[in-house]
Image (spheres, rainbow, N blue to C red):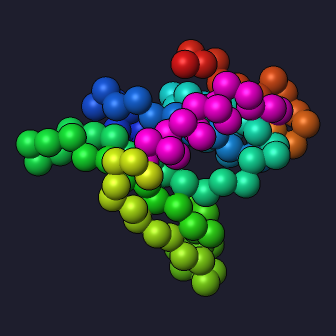
Amino acid sequence: MGQLKHLKDLGCDVKALIQKQEGAETLKAAGINYHCDGYNHNKLMLIDAYYAGSWRKAVFTGSYNLTANSAHDSNDAMLRVINDWVTNQYVEQFKTLWAGSNACDGAGDGSSDGSSD
């Protein structure tokens, strides 16, 4: 969570689409804009950033959860794809999920206090 907050503080557009309400308070405390979708089971991270002199796009996807359990105890996998076309497809999917998000586990309104764009 510290790295996400750091990126936000640097001016990056950091958004999280979460499935369970249990992560919402941590995101809210860090000032991370989030939406909930209790039906969403995607596990992905999208990066579209200016780095080392050029714009780079990547998507990380797989069974890996961003938790200590996945990092240390589970047999999860994550795949990094560095391809503009593939990343753009995931960006469009994320936009669709973001716009149509539902409540986490049926609780709350499903979004943070921040903007919803």
Q: Is residue 94 magenta?
A: yes
Q: Residue furthest left?
A: 53
For the C terminus, which image quadrant?
A: top right
Residue 86, percent from left and from top:
44, 52
Q: Which one is nearer the viewer's eye here, 39 or 19?
A: 39
- State whether residue 111 is above or below residue 87: above
Q: Residue at x 73, y 54 (%)?
A: 41
Q: Is residue 21 left or right of residue 30?
A: right
- State whether residue 83 is above or below residue 79: above
Magenta part of the protein: which range? 87-103
Q: Is residue 22 visible?
A: no
Q: Which one is nearer the viewer's eye here, 28 or 104?
A: 104
Q: Is residue 54 left or right of residue 28?
A: left
Principal SS element in the magenta part?
A: helix
Residue 100, percent from left and from top:
74, 28
**Quarter-of-image position of residue 103:** top right
